[in-house]
Amino acid sequence: MDRKIGRMSQNITESAQLIDRPAMSMAAAGSRPAFLYVSIRDLLFRKISSGELPPGTVLKEAPVAGQLGVSRAPVRRALALLAEAGLIFEAGGQGFKVGQAEPVQLPLRQLHQILTGEPEEIDRSPSWERIFDEVREEITAAMPFGSWRIQEAALGDHFNVSRTVAREVLWRLMDRRLVDKDSKSHWIVGQMTARDLRETLEMRALMEPAALVQVLPGLDRAWLAGLETQVAALIRVFPQVDPQALDQIDQAMFQEMFAGLRNSRLLASIRRNQISLVVPHLFRHHFPLTDDLAALLDYARILHHLGRDEAEAAQVLMRSHLLRIGRLTLARLRVLSLLPPPRRVAWLIPAHQGGI
């Protein structure tokens, strides 16, 4: 028995490298896994490695899926990958068993206790949510450099999701005016133009200050104070600032700030007209941070008044900020358009290709 357990431990150690595949890259980087089957596979791997699922334990699709509250398909794939890694083996038509020991059927109650001891590890969010941010990032990074066509099937293949999931992502990006459809129903990413920026900044200057007054009563005062502290800290050390920290401040000021807006139509309109936020995000990752201090000072003043329930003063300052940044944003777009296009992903091709 000791030799069997020893061999099992060796298999687990040797299989750790096999488990760490590309689909795990997000988890390894500290993000949640992109796919449900990855979460399930990781959970089972940990339970096997720790001995909570001892050698011989029988693992079947239906019982595992039932205890985790998921469908059988991601469980099937997770088990197949664990089998490929040599951690589990076919159990004579009775699913899989852990290691090479004789099959042992665990009572459902015991299986439930083992698998649900850390339920937060299973990400049950819709598949489109897991890839949305990465798809959006790739698309927005390409926008200053021309028009692009998105190949729906290739997008699904790239992320190992169905075309239905890929299409859901694209429809949601279309709702934010980041993609569109041409006369042939191809998914198109249009080139970002100066006119786009001028018009959307005008819309933002009309909508966001008005929304600020509506949302202020529901804003968490501790959150506002924390954000004001973060901005003050960045001002003190500027320009020795991580570009990502500035991106996060922008997201807080113009996206998280309005998340609690009760007027859903106004919120949707705000989201659709925030394309101008793409430009400073891209610019910061190509050039030194020299022009962002003025924005941080604007944010500090806005937050100062919001924290004291001075809605009208904050409203005036936000409108002034949005009007002021127009010229800078347009200048940055002109500079970005002169850079070489970014590295392309396989599902994003120039619009003049592909028979358009």
Image (tube, grey):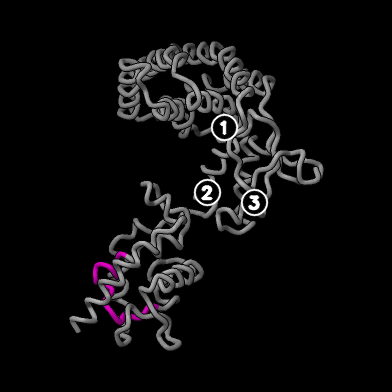
- The label nearer to you, 1 versus 3, is 3
Give coordinates of residue 130: x percent, y percent: 49, 50
Give the distance between the C-alpha atoms of the residues marked 1 and 3, in whole angstroms: 20 Å
Q: Of marks 1 and 2, which one's residue comes earlier in the chain? A: 2
Report helix, strand or loop for mark 3: helix
Closest to the observer, 265 or 72: 72
Question: Where is mark 1, residue-wise?
Answer: 271
- Mark 2 and mark 3 residues within 8 Å of each other at the beta carbon: no
- Amino acid type at mark 1: Arg
Residue 295, compared with residue 150, is above or below; it is above
- The label nearer to you, 1 versus 2, is 2
Give the distance between the C-alpha atoms of the residues marked 2 and 3, in whole angstroms: 12 Å
Give coordinates of residue 241: x percent, y percent: 36, 22
Give coordinates of residue 343: x percent, y percent: 58, 38
Give the distance between the C-alpha atoms of the residues marked 1 and 2, in whole angstroms: 19 Å
Residue 190, compared with residue 74, is above or below; it is above
Q: Residue at the location (42% across, 55% down)?
A: 24
- Amino acid type at mark 3: Arg
In the rendered structure, find residue 167 and report the number of the disc placed on it. 3
Question: Where is mark 2, residue-wise?
Answer: 131
Say whether residue 305 is magenta. no
Report helix, strand or loop for mark 1: helix
Q: Quadrant of the C terminus?
A: top right
User: Which quarter of the figure has residue 310?
Assistant: top left
User: Which quarter of the figure has residue 15?
Assistant: bottom left
Residue 141, compared with residue 231, is above or below; it is below
- Amino acid type at mark 2: Ile
Q: Which residues are magenta?
A: 46-59
User: 144 left or right of 297?
Assistant: right
User: 199 left or right of 55?
Assistant: right
Asked whether the viewer can see residue 123, the reply is yes
Give coordinates of residue 354: x percent, y percent: 76, 46
